[in-house]
């Protein structure tokens, strides 16, 4: 009978220890789920910020065809242009340069360890003598 009590006590201790380990593991899983969700939301906001910045720069540069032609003809490397957007979500820099016969408008939004990038590729339509949007990435 004493041996049964001892084995029951030992089993109870093992079960309590296992339950506490399970609770700690579930707590860590919950923490990681929230962290992944927060990172996903932050990434989406950074992407929206980059999309806004590249669209704003595109709208501005669409009016300045001479600048776009100069970038293309001089094969300018990527260089910062426009304003730097900063808010509580992060900051965003916009770059313009030439690559493979196209003018690239590239926006990079960053916050801590998160980063989002959006770019527009513009090509010169020689018939209309105007740059047109070839693609967005």
Image (tube, rainbow, N blue to C red):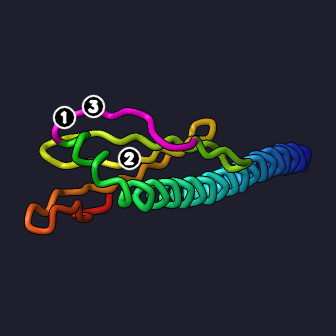
Magenta stretch, residue numbers: 73-83
Q: Secondary structure at mark 3?
A: loop
Left or right: 114 as drawn, with respect to 134 = right
Q: Earlier in the sequence, mark 2 or mark 1?
A: 1
Query: CA gap, disc 3 to disc 2?
Result: 12 Å
Q: Are marks 3 and 2 in contact (CB under 8 Å)?
A: no
Q: Are marks 3 and 1 in contact (CB under 8 Å)?
A: yes
Is residue 17 positioned above or below 63 on the image? Answer: above
Q: Mark 2: which secondary structure?
A: strand
- In the picture of the structure, the residue carrying the numbered disc 2 is 106
CA distance for labels 2 and 1: 16 Å
Q: Nearer the viewer, residue 111 or 91?
A: 91
Image location of residue 76, percent across then percent down:
25, 33
Identified at 74% across, 48% down, the residue is 88
Q: Which residue position holds label 3?
A: 77
Crowding at dot 1, Cα within 10 Å, few <14 / some 14-19 / many 20+, comes out as some
- Name which quarter of the figure residue 86 lies in: top right
- Outermost residue, bottom side: 128
- Residue 57: x %, y % from top left: 45, 54
């Amino acid at each position: 009978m004493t041996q049964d009590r001892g084995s029951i006590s030992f089993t109870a201790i093992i079960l309590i220890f296992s339950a506490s380990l399970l609770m700690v593991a579930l707590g860590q899983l919950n923490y990681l789920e929230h962290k992944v969700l927060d990172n996903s939301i932050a990434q989406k906001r950074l992407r929206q910020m980059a999309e806004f910045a590249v669209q704003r720069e595109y709208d501005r540069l669409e009016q300045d065809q001479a600048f776009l032609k100069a970038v293309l003809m001089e094969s300018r490397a990527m260089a910062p242009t426009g304003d730097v957007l900063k808010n509580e979500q992060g900051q965003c820099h916009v770059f313009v340069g030439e690559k493979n016969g196209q003018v690239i408008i590239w926006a990079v939004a960053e916050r801590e360890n998160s980063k989002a990038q959006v770019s527009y590729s513009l090509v010169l339509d020689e018939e209309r003598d105007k740059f047109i949007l070839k693609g967005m990435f």
